[in-house]
Image (spheres, rainbow, N blue to C red):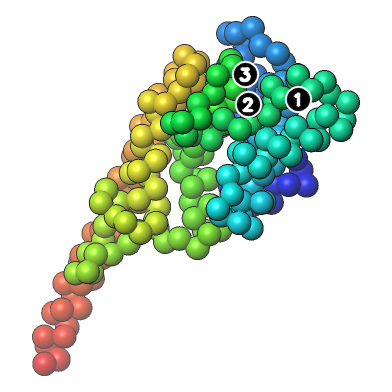
């Protein structure tokens, strides 16, 4: 895992936070601790392959990498297969939902790291890595708030993903943690939108006034 986690948004600390969330959620359930721990530690090892080829799904690639690693390390085929299934379903896809309690806990733990202030920070780190802007402008030069954007940006990511993630958890513990963080993420987005809109509008007004004087 340490050799595979290279970028700031998906580094080893993200992995350890997911592990910590997983263990906290698992206190309310009967789980296979080995499977859950291995799944949490290895769930993002396919990220490097996806960065090299965006057409790949890191969950699918990583699940196979984890299976091969665990069986080569002496794990039974059944336990390694359980981990493979957990990792393959940790990424949100309607046609590939987690089934076992370990898979559902991993899914929830990973999504918790996209909530609240940490979720905002990780998203900003990621868009910096891939070179996406904080916001986009329409054809009139007005700042878009992300609700109707077609081009990638932080504002679009918030409106299409971050603010909608709070209803998609499987476990009650994860739902509670997420609900406690929702407001801080909303406030950050709204304050940032305000901070970029107000000086932008005022700046355009001042520039137009200056141009008219020069005419």
Extreme-bottom residue of the structure: 215
Q: Is residue 15 visible?
A: no
Residue 158: horizontal and vertical position, in percent? 37, 44
Q: Dot 2 corresponds to which residue? A: 86
The reply to whether discs 2 and 1 touch (Cβ–Cβ < 8 Å) is no
The span from disc 2 to disc 1 (Cα, nearest Å) is: 10 Å
Q: Crowding near pointer 1: few (<14 within 10 Å), some, many (20+)? A: many
Would you place residue 160 above or below residue 148 in this image? above
Residue 3: horizontal and vertical position, in percent? 78, 47
At x 33%, y 44%, the residue is: 159
The span from disc 1 to disc 3 (Cα, nearest Å) is: 13 Å
Q: Is residue 210 visible?
A: yes
- In the rendered structure, the answer to whether residue 147 lies left or right of residue 61 reads left
* Quadrant (top left, top right, bottom left, bottom right) of the N terminus: top right
- In the image, which disc is placed on residue 181? none
Asked which secondary structure carries label 1, the reply is: helix
Asked which secondary structure carries label 3, the reply is: helix
Q: Crowding near pointer 3: few (<14 within 10 Å), some, many (20+)? A: many
Q: Crowding near pointer 2: few (<14 within 10 Å), some, many (20+)? A: many
- In the rendered structure, the answer to whether residue 114 lies left or right of residue 29 reads left
Q: Dot 1 corresponds to which residue? A: 80
Residue 77: horizontal and vertical position, in percent? 79, 22
The reply to whether discs 3 and 2 touch (Cβ–Cβ < 8 Å) is yes
- In the image, which disc is placed on residue 102? 3
At x 16%, y 72%, the residue is: 205
Query: In front here: 60 or 37?
Result: 60
At x 74%, y 39%, the residue is: 65
- In the rendered structure, the answer to whether residue 21 lies left or right of residue 72 reads left
At x 53%, y 59%, the residue is: 130
Which of the two labelled residues, at mark 1 and mark 3, occupies the earlier sequence position? Answer: 1
Asked where in the image residue 52 lies, by quadrant, the reply is bottom right
């Amino acid at each position: 895992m340490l050799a595979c986690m290279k970028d700031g948004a998906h580094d080893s600390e993200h992995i350890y936070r997911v592990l910590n969330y997983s263990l906290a959620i698992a206190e309310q359930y009967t789980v296979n601790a080995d499977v859950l721990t291995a799944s949490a530690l290895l769930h993002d090892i396919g990220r490097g392959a996806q960065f090299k080829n965006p057409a790949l799904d890191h969950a699918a690639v990583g699940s196979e990498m984890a299976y091969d690693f665990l069986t080569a390390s002496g794990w039974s085929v059944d336990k390694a297969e359980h981990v493979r299934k957990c990792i393959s379903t940790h990424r949100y896809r309607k046609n590939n939902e987690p089934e076992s309690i370990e898979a559902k806990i991993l899914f929830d733990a990973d999504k918790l790291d996209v909530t609240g202030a940490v979720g905002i920070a990780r998203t900003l780190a990621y868009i910096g890595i891939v070179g996406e802007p904080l916001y986009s402008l329409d054809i009139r030069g007005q700042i878009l708030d992300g609700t109707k954007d077609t081009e990638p940006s932080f504002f679009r990511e918030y409106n299409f993903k971050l603010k909608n993630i709070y209803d998609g958890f499987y476990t009650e513990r994860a739902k509670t943690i997420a609900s406690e963080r929702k407001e801080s993420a909303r406030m950050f987005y709204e304050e940032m939108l305000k901070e970029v809109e107000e000086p932008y509008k005022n700046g355009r007004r001042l520039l137009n006034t200056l141009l008219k004087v020069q005419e």
